[in-house]
Image: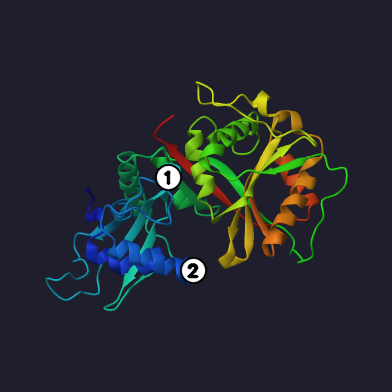
Amino acid sequence: MSHSSSLQIRNATDAEFSQLLPVLLAQLTDDERDQKRDFLLNAPPKSMAPWCREPHATQQNFRGGLWVAQSTDSPGPSSAAGPRTATGPLALIWAHPAPGKTVLLGRPQSLSWSRESCEAQADPPHLEIQFELVRQATQWASAIDCEMLQAVAEADDQAFQSALERHSIRKLVDLIYLSSPILEPSAVARSPGSKLQLEVLPPRPENLKRWYSVIESTYLDSRDCPALQGHRSMPSVVSGYRATGTEWENGWVILRPPDSPIPVILPSPSNKLNPDQTNDLGCFILADHPAHDFVELVYFGLVPAARGQGLGVQILAEIEASAKRLGRSRIIAAVDRKNLPALRVYAAANYVVLEERSVFARFFTV
């Protein structure tokens, strides 16, 4: 609990949690909203979240990370003890578990109350309230089993960015979100003389060491989000990739030289793979978003030896063919603003800019 003049920061009560759910889940589709509302209201506290794919994420974790700012001069919304007034918490912030031992921190939101409902306001909370909400949420995240606290801020949301940086949540990267041109449903054949072989390798337990190896190899000297490197374990990274959108096993593809045999890797005592044994050139990972009719390019990377050979446009064509086979109308990708070679590849493929956002993080383990 924290006090600043007449301001109290505290966990939301059970009654408030129920009242605030429409605000918390407003951006979801109807099906997603119904599933999460039912779980958050009715599941036992220690029940695992079915949509989260995070083995440590319980219902209690999701409820425990909801913090509200309350004026000590005003009563909160009603409980069983009496009728609700039209005055409740002034603002909220929600920190909740995500795959890969991550906690996602939403932006603070101002609230308005009526006798029937609570609504989010367009104007953000006062800067002092944002500071206090972020402080409490950060302390909560540091006390649970997570590697990283992550927040995404709009480019013009200077108040939220200031609140994050005040509590050692540093900017990692400015991301540019891109969209492919509208994809026609016609089939796309692979071009003859392709420089690559595509190996679909679902992220099943027996394949994970191979995936850890190839992803680590593509991180070497990468220009895409280099500030993330070395802060997270590879199992956590892959868990995060797997939980994006609707997992699609055929969207996990390893890139290999043409006509090279698929490697047979025997377990090693160190439980790691030597990249030289696999001859892998890189990979891409796709996730399906059927409710929004697009495929997300979750990750795309090449090992250093495969860069600078003009493979990028060819790989985007392969990704486009995969999205068409799935029946989606476009591809969405996010790229580090400083990764100029990648941005040139997307521009050559006629991708257009949708928006820009900044990703902030604080690491609790190395």
Residue 169 vs residue 146, the one in the foreground:
146
Looking at the image, residue 118 lies above or below residue 357 = below
Residue 91 point in image, percent of width and height: 33, 61
Residue 250 point in image, percent of width and height: 63, 51
Q: How many labels does the image show?
A: 2
- In this view of the protein, can residue 122 be seen by the observer? no
Q: Relative to 133, is 349 on the left or the right?
A: right
For label 2, the SS is: loop
Q: Which residue is drawn at 67% across and 61% down?
A: 326
Quadrant of residue 135 within the rendered picture: top left
For label 1, the SS is: helix
Looking at the image, residue 266 lies above or below residue 67 = above
In the rendered image, the residue lying farthest to the bottom is 116
Q: Relative to 318, is 1 on the left or the right?
A: left
Q: Relative to 184, is 74 on the left or the right?
A: left
Q: Which residue is drawn at 77% across and 66% down?
A: 184
Q: Residue 240 carries which label?
A: none
In the rendered image, the residue lying farthest to the left is 81
Q: Distance from label 1 to label 2 (Cα)?
A: 28 Å
Q: Nearer the viewer, mark 1 or mark 2?
A: 2
Q: Residue at x 43, y 55 (%)?
A: 107
Three-letter code for the amino acid on which mark 2 is drawn = Thr
Three-letter code for the amino acid on which mark 1 is drawn = Leu
Residue 265 vs residue 255, the one in the foreground:
265
- In this view of the protein, can residue 134 be seen by the observer? yes
Looking at the image, residue 359 lies above or below residue 89 = above
The residue that disc 1 covers is 164
Of labels 1 and 2, earlier in sequence is: 2
The residue that disc 2 covers is 29
Looking at the image, residue 66 lies above or below residue 144 = below
